[in-house]
Image: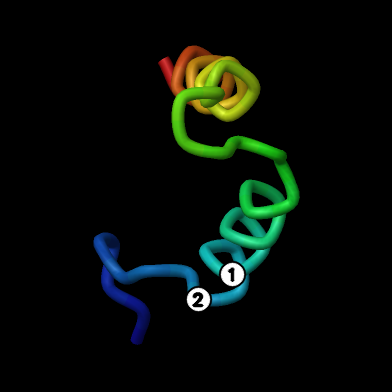
Amino acid sequence: MLQANAVNHDRMVKTFMDLVVIDSPSGQEEAIGRELSKRLRDLG
């Protein structure tokens, strides 16, 4: 039985892979920041 707070491994890996392709070297994190802000807004 799947617990309500269990981590969805496949979704976590996909999210990680989606984020690591965003170019965001030190001092130039605007693109990753925008993406993370959008994802968090979408989650409410």
Viewport quadrant of the C terminus: top left
Residue sitting at 48 percent across and 13 percent down? 41
In the rendered image, residue 43, in percent from the top left (x then y), is placed at 47, 24
Q: What residue does disc 1 label?
A: 13
Label 2 Cα crowd, 10 Å radius (few <14 / some 14-19 / many 20+): few
Apparent side of residue 8 relative to residue 16 in the rendered image (left or right): left
Apparent side of residue 5 relative to residue 26 in the rendered image (left or right): left
The numbered dot on residue 42 is none
In the rendered image, residue 38, in percent from the top left (x then y), is placed at 58, 16
Labels 1 & 2 near each other (Cβ < 8 A) = yes
Quarter of the figure with residue 23:
top right
Residue sitting at 71 percent across and 51 percent down? 18
Apparent side of residue 15 relative to residue 41 in the rendered image (left or right): right
C-alpha span from label 1 to label 2:
6 Å
**Secondary structure under the numbered disc 2 in the rendered image:** helix
Q: Amino acid at mark 2?
A: His
**Secondary structure under the numbered disc 1 in the rendered image:** helix
In the rendered image, residue 34, in percent from the top left (x then y), is placed at 58, 15
Viewport quadrant of the N terminus: bottom left
Q: Can you say whether 2 is above or below 40 in the image?
A: below
Q: What residue does disc 2 label?
A: 9
The one nearer the camera, 33 or 5, is 33
Q: Amino acid at mark 1?
A: Val
